């Protein structure tokens, strides 16, 4: 079954076309990544999926339920972790989660609430008021809130923005488990290594358009070859090697480049030319292409 069916969705804010005809089909049980730079339209699309804002054109269906004409049924199938931290400061964590259960008509939900709190390491904060929580803790509650009604489809809009390593690991462990148990997961993140580790399929948005949609494996295969990272203590890259630069890299001192190589045998030639030019190499690394390379290539118009 199709978990989320997005068909020709358009959204305009005055003169700004935030979404320009987006179509995507996300199947039940998928772990799907929705990626794109700031302002690409990810949150706008998620808000339309959640029924928080209306599309100007097009439709979204969750498990076959239209998010506008069949809002209640669609909403029941969906748990959304919003990008913005919004909460009622006067309730404790447990009260917040009970209240959210109430919205879905779940009177006796304490066993699941306890399990969710336990899995997100929230149990010690169960009776703390929301306003007294740190930013990362509030985000955990947002995740818990999205999960109180055990929705088959879970959408997370940058759930790991500004959270520590421990929560990330806790969160991914729990979300992976839910995905293994059959829940569909849609994830938005700027941490591409997280997306690469978690998502089986990805769509990339750029200024409101889908510019790539494929399995992670197929996307990675699109970039052939690897990269040689060279950090030079002194000297610079000779002219003859400059065409290999994929992007300059930040370095505290000296110059650092990422060079595209198609064959490991090319490394020898590159090193010889660097030596001839008098450059002194401080550090060197060989890297396989990853999602970040593909992302940059696609976003910089390489598509
Ligand atoms: N309520 C609004 N009124 C006017 N413009 C808006 C509104 N909400 C979003 N936009 C604009 O729509 C575009 C898409 O915004 P959106 O928040 O969907 O991007 P995003 O991909 O989620 O970005 P980020 O990675 O920064 O979260 C942006 O140009 C944004 O400025
Ligand atoms: Mg956003």
Image: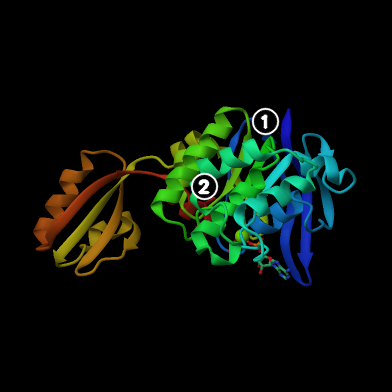
Q: Is residue 88 left or right of residue 139?
A: right
Name the residue furthest front.
127
Label 1 crowd (10 A; few <14 / some 14-19 / many >=20): some
Q: Residue at x 67, y 53 (%)?
A: 95
Kindly report which numbered mark, 2 or 1, lies closer to the viewer in this rendering. Answer: 2
Judged left or right of residue 298, residue 260 is: left
Q: Is residue 216 left or right of residue 11?
A: left
Quarter occupied by residue 289: top left
Quick one: 85 or 104, which is closer to the camera?
A: 104
The quadrant in which the N terminus is found is: top right
Image spot of residue 255 (x, y percent): 22, 66
Q: Which mark is residue 143?
A: none
- Say which element carries label 1: loop
Query: Which residue is the extreme one toward the bottom?
Result: 15
Within 10 Å of the Cα at label 2, are there few (<14), some (14-19), or many (20+) other Cα atoms?
some
Return the residue at label 1: 28
Q: How is the image coloured?
A: rainbow
Quickly name the residue at label 2: 123
Q: Can residue 219 be seen here?
A: no
Which callout, 2 or 1, points at the residue further toward the start of the chain? 1
Residue that appears at 43% across and 44% down: 169
Instruction: State the image coordinates of residue 287 (x, y, percent, origin top left).
Output: 30, 45
């Amino acid at each position: 079954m199709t978990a989320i069916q997005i068909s020709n969705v358009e959204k305009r804010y005055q003169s700004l076309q935030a979404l320009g005809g987006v179509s995507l089909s996300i199947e039940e049980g998928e772990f799907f990544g929705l990626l794109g730079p700031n302002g690409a339209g990810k949150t706008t699309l998620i808000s339309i999926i959640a029924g928080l804002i209306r599309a100007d054109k097009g439709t979204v269906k969750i498990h076959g339920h239209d998010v506008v004409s069949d809002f209640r049924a669609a909403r029941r199938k969906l748990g959304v972790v919003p990008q913005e931290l919004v909460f009622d400061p006067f309730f404790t964590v447990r009260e917040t989660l009970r209240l959210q259960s109430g919205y879905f008509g779940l009177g006796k939900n304490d066993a699941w609430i306890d399990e969710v709190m336990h899995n997100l390491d929230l149990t010690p904060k169960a009776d703390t008021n929301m306003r007294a929580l740190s930013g990362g803790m509030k985000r955990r509650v947002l995740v818990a809130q999205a999960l109180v009604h055990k929705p088959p489809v879970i959408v997370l809009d940058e759930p790991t923005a500004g959270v520590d390593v421990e929560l990330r690991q806790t969160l991914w462990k729990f979300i992976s488990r839910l995905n293994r148990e059959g829940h569909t997961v849609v994830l938005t993140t700027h941490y591409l290594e997280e997306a690469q580790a978690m998502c089986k399929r990805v769509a990339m948005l750029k200024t409101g358009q889908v510019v790539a949609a494929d399995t992670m494996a197929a996307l990675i295969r699109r970039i052939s070859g690897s990269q040689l990272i060279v950090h030079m203590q002194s000297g610079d890259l000779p002219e003859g090697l400059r065409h290999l630069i994929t992007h300059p890299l930040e370095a505290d001192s000296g110059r650092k480049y990422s060079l595209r190589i198609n064959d490991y045998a090319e490394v020898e030639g590159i090193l010889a030319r660097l030596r001839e030019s008098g450059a002194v190499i401080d550090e060197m690394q060989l890297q396989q292409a990853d999602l970040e390379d593909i992302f940059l290539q696609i976003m910089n118009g390489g598509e």
